[in-house]
Image (cartoon, helix red, strand yellow):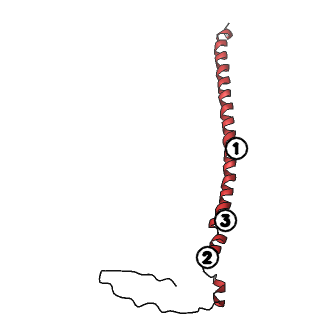
Amino acid sequence: MRLTRFVPLYAVLVLVLALIGGFNQVRYRHQARLIEHKSELHELISDLRTDAAQIQGPLAVGAWARQTGMVPSPEVGRLRHVAYFPAPQAQASPAGLEMRTIWR
């Protein structure tokens, strides 16, 4: 007789447990999709880093430097400078401070 009182409570608890289990399965599938998306993003990052290294990496910077006329430091001793020009005479500017840079 006392056990028949708990049958509705047991049924409610079983339904609550079933709802929690269903919600847990939805969250589990969502977590699996997020983990898969994370691995795809890691692959994308490694591909983009490879692409960036071709543009900004040390080899790309060295190639750019050689194309613009810069010389690697081990080869400096083998070079001869051709025409040396002294720096131009500075002229005082009456309008305040003036700065000029001459690249040779």
The x and y percentages for residue 90 are 39, 89
Residue 98 in the image: above or below residue 80: above
The residue drawn where x is 65% and y is 64% is 53
Which residue is more in the foreground, 49 or 28?
Answer: 49
Quadrant of the rendering where the N terminus is positioned? top right
Residue bearing the label numbered 1:
36
Give the spatial CA distance, label 1 vs label 2: 42 Å
Numbered circle sitting on residue 65:
2
Which residue is more in the foreground, 65 or 2?
Answer: 65
Residue bearing the label numbered 3:
54
Type of amino acid at the residue the image marks with label 1: Glu
- Label 1 or label 2, whichever lies nearer to me, is 2
Type of amino acid at the residue the image marks with label 3: Gln
Secondary structure at badge 1 equals helix
Residue 96 in the image: above or below residue 89: above
The residue drawn where x is 69% and y is 35% is 29
Which one is earlier in the sequence, the residue at label 1 or at label 2?
1
Secondary structure at badge 3 equals helix
Q: Residue furthest top?
A: 1
- Label 2–label 3 contact, CB within 8 A: no
